[in-house]
Amino acid sequence: MLKRLKIENLAIIEDLEIGFQQGMTALTGQTGAGKSLLIDSLKLLFGARADQDLIRFGKEEAIVEGFFTNLNDRLKIELERLGLNSDELIIKRQINRANKNLLSVNQKSITLQELRRLTYFLGDIHEQHDITKLLDPKLQLSLIDQIAYEDIEPLYNTFVIQKDKYNQSKHKYELALKDKQKKETELESLKDQFDELTKMKLIENEEETLTIQIEKLSHQEKILSNVNKAFEVLDELYQKGDLYEAGDALGEIKHYDPLYLEGSNRLKEIYYELEGFRSDLKKSLNMFDYFSDSELNSLEERLHEIKTLEKKYGKTVSELIEYKAELEEKILISEDYEGYLKKLKTESTEAHKTLIKAGMALRKERMKLSKALEQELINELNQLDLDKVRFEITFEPLKEDVELYDDGIDFVTFNIGLNEGEPLKPLYKTASGGELSRFMLALKIVFAKTLGLNLVVFDEIDMGISGKAASKVALRIKALSNLLQVLSITHLPQVASKADHHYHIKKEVKDHRTQTHLEPLSYDRRVEVLAEMLSGERIDLYAIEHAKALLVK
């Protein structure tokens, strides 16, 4: 349940902290008093995107913080999955004009997506425009999915992934089909490039090797002179064996001082290193034995050819080797383009079959859910003064060429019959405003009970309802509050009177600034507010007596 809500600098709310209790809480007030801001605040806590326009004029930051307790098991599991304390839930949103917005849950930063998953199991907020979802057949399917989100989500995700794979496969095939003529004309050019690169017999790092060889051969005399001179000196030193003898001498007295032992070992190591270096130095001159001036010219010509090829193609030797392999593949494809097209067509067909299979699995689960939802909604609607109602969710029959939508292969219609003897018709053609409100309330009640939510917020879900139906709606909202916490923004005195707790929202001007305040109502003030709701600004005795009668439990 929502235990406390704290709001700072949100539009006309400067600093507001409200404590809530279990059961049903009514929130009433004149239009424009700030009721919608409470909904905006709760929407932020439930993962709505932050809007800088909500920040109070003259302030740099707005803060909304909610404290929730008595969490349900599903919500606790989600908190533990994120490594968060599951005994309570503290959600904090900070909106900054510098776009440095902050979001934390139990003092830990999380993403909006993670917050939305958490709050899916926390509660549900009904906004006034939600009723339009009932009128839009494209959105009716999402209402079915919400009833069992955890069951639908993996099937839905599988469909989306498979649809992406199919689209990619189909797109690849269609591009290949368009490129058929182009590929045929390009084949000759590809072969010319491939032949040219094949004749060059390029080797990885060949350019660097050639450069080093050419550099050495170009300075042959200098290298020979200096290497031979160094070799003679080192050879004389090695042949004498003085370093080895010095090492042996120190080895004879190594037990007298660690320095002698270390010196003996190091001198012998140097001796053997010197032997190895002499050998390497001598070998370094071997290349000059079999390289002539003509061969130097050949190396220079080879390097020039490579650099010319690199400039022509705008690629390095390494990239040219890769490009040659790409050319070979393109040539093979071009020479057997019909086979390539057939392969892509087969892949696309298989991807489509897999996609339809995923869509059918999703459809099967939705049809099962829709049947359960039909009966539960009828039961709820019967208790909302619609005792003759008939309701059916129809799935559009699948065509041979199955229609692919963003959310599956299904298109559904909510059909309803409100009067005995009348045929079922689409909801948007039949229901009045008040009937739509009751239908949405029934849907929200089913949704809340199915998911075991902690909190439901109704923003004028009773819009367009009056008389006997209003009393029935009030009783159902009250009954729901026996299972979970209910916050109801309402203009109906019948609904407000059934609440366990009643807040009146009003705005006032202080220091030339408009501010919103919440007044917890005592019994006497509650009678006044209800009387005003019944009769308007001018309260009469009848309205007061009527208000008192409504408050009798």
Image: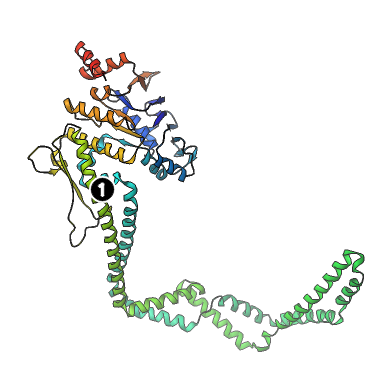
- Residue lying farthest left? 421
Residue 188, x across and y down, in percent: 35, 81
Name the residue rendered at 49%, 82% in the picture: 200
Of 417 and 349, the residue lying toward us: 417
Residue 108 is left or right of residue 115, and the answer is right
Of 467 and 339, the residue lying toward us: 467
Of 367 and 252, the residue lying toward us: 367
Give the residue type that dot 1 points to: Leu
Residue 259, x across and y down, in percent: 88, 64
Residue 267, x across and y down, in percent: 84, 72
For the image shown, how many numbered marks are present on the structure?
1
Q: Quadrant location of residue 328?
A: bottom left
Q: Quadrant location of residue 73?
A: top left
User: Which quadrant holds the N terminus?
Assistant: top left
Instruction: Examine the rendered structure and indicate whether residue 482 appears above or below residue 81.
Output: above
Q: Quadrant location of residue 251?
A: bottom right
Q: Is residue 425 visible?
A: yes
Q: Residues within 10 Å of mark 1 (few under 14, many from 20)?
A: some
Display coloring: rainbow
Instruction: Examine the rendered structure and indicate whether residue 295 appears above or below residue 177.
Output: below
Residue 398 is left or right of residue 293, and the answer is left
Name the residue rendered at 40%, 81% in the picture: 192
Of 30 and 211, the residue lying toward us: 30
Residue 219 is left or right of residue 410, and the answer is right
Residue 35, x across and y down, in percent: 32, 27
Q: Is residue 176 visible?
A: no
| Residue under pointer 1 | 369
User: Which quadrant holds the C terminus?
Assistant: top left
Element under disc 1: helix
Name the residue rendered at 39%, 42% in the picture: 74
